[in-house]
């Protein structure tokens, strides 16, 4: 049955996807994935490796448009006259911020060009493994444009670009309900004539 596609699964998927999308060449010509950091609100956020990419889970919103209140058949017990049905997953939209950091504008442009080349537009299907171990995809839609937010200190400059994505997710704990099952139908009809 279904399983969750929630923050832990999306975090893991983003890290893998970003590392596949953005790679630099080592001095020996070997492809090296860019370092990726998942920002956590309960931990210090320190960037100490450049270039790098971070993803930050910002907030969530219940997605009424994708809500499906249909119950799915699981099993039936004719002797007990019961049927077991499963509730649909609860859909959410998760907002994610993807930050690109570099010490040179050339590296920043290279990373963002590789990113856009990999995603192929403003939306893409993020490959994700749900909490049950099943490979799926989560739709990701870019919100707004690429924003530059460079940092300047007395001795250095950090080049920074930001993208925000809405990612479709769902919570599904396989909530099941038992309902009565009709096993016999009486087709006998009484017709009274009314004068």
Image (tube, helix red, strand yellow):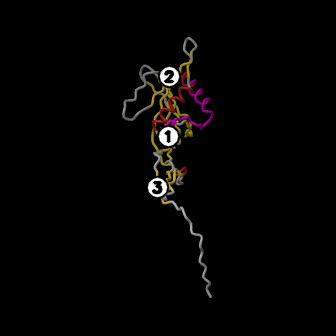
What residue is rendered at 61% in x and 79% in y?
191
Q: Quadrant of residue 154?
A: top left
Q: Which residue is mark 3?
A: 178
Front in this rendered view, residue 85 or 122: 85
Q: Quadrant of the C terminus?
A: bottom right
Is residue 70 shown above or below 143? below
Dot 2 or dot 1: first in sequence order is: 1
- Residue 146 position, x and y percent, is 55, 34
Q: Disc 1 versus disc 3: distance between alpha carbons?
A: 25 Å
CB under 8 Å between discs 3 and 2: no
Dot 1 or dot 3: first in sequence order is: 1
Q: Quadrant of residue 117?
A: top right
On residue 51, the disc is: 2
Q: How busy is the neighbourhood of tag 1: few (under 14 within 10 Å), some, or many (20 plus)?
A: many
Q: Identify the element where label 2 is drawn.
A: loop
On residue 5, the disc is: 1
Magenta segment: does it hold 122? yes
Is residue 182 shown above or below 140? below
Write the start and end of the magenta stretch as one range: 110-133
Magenta segment: does it hold 119? yes
What residue is rendered at 50% in x and 29% in y?
15
- Residue 143 position, x and y percent, is 55, 40
Q: How busy is the neighbourhood of tag 3: few (under 14 within 10 Å), some, or many (20 plus)?
A: few
What residue is rendered at 42% in x and 22% in y?
48
Q: Identify the element where label 1 is drawn.
A: loop
Q: Identify the element where label 3 is drawn.
A: strand
119 sits to left or right of 36: right
């Amino acid at each position: 049955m279904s399983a969750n596609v929630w923050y832990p699964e999306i975090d893991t998927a983003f890290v893998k996807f970003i590392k596949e999308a953005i790679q630099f060449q080592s001095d020996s010509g070997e492809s090296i994935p860019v370092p990726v950091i998942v920002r956590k609100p309960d931990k210090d956020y320190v960037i100490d490796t450049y270039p790098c990419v971070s993803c930050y889970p910002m907030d969530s919103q219940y997605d009424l448009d994708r809500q499906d209140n249909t119950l799915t058949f699981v099993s039936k017990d004719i002797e007990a006259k019961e049927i077991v049905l499963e509730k649909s997953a609860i859909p959410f939209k998760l907002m994610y911020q993807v930050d690109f950091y570099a010490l040179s504008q050339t590296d920043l442009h290279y990373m963002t060009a590789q990113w856009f080349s990999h995603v192929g537009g403003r939306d893409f299907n993020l490959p994700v493994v749900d909490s049950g171990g099943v490979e799926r995809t989560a739709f990701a839609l870019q919100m707004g444009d690429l924003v530059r937010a460079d940092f300047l200190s007395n001795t250095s400059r950090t080049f920074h670009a930001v993208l925000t994505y809405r990612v479709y997710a769902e919570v599904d704990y396989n909530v099941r309900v038992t309902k009565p099952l009709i096993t016999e139908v009486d087709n006998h009809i009484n017709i009274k004539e009314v004068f």
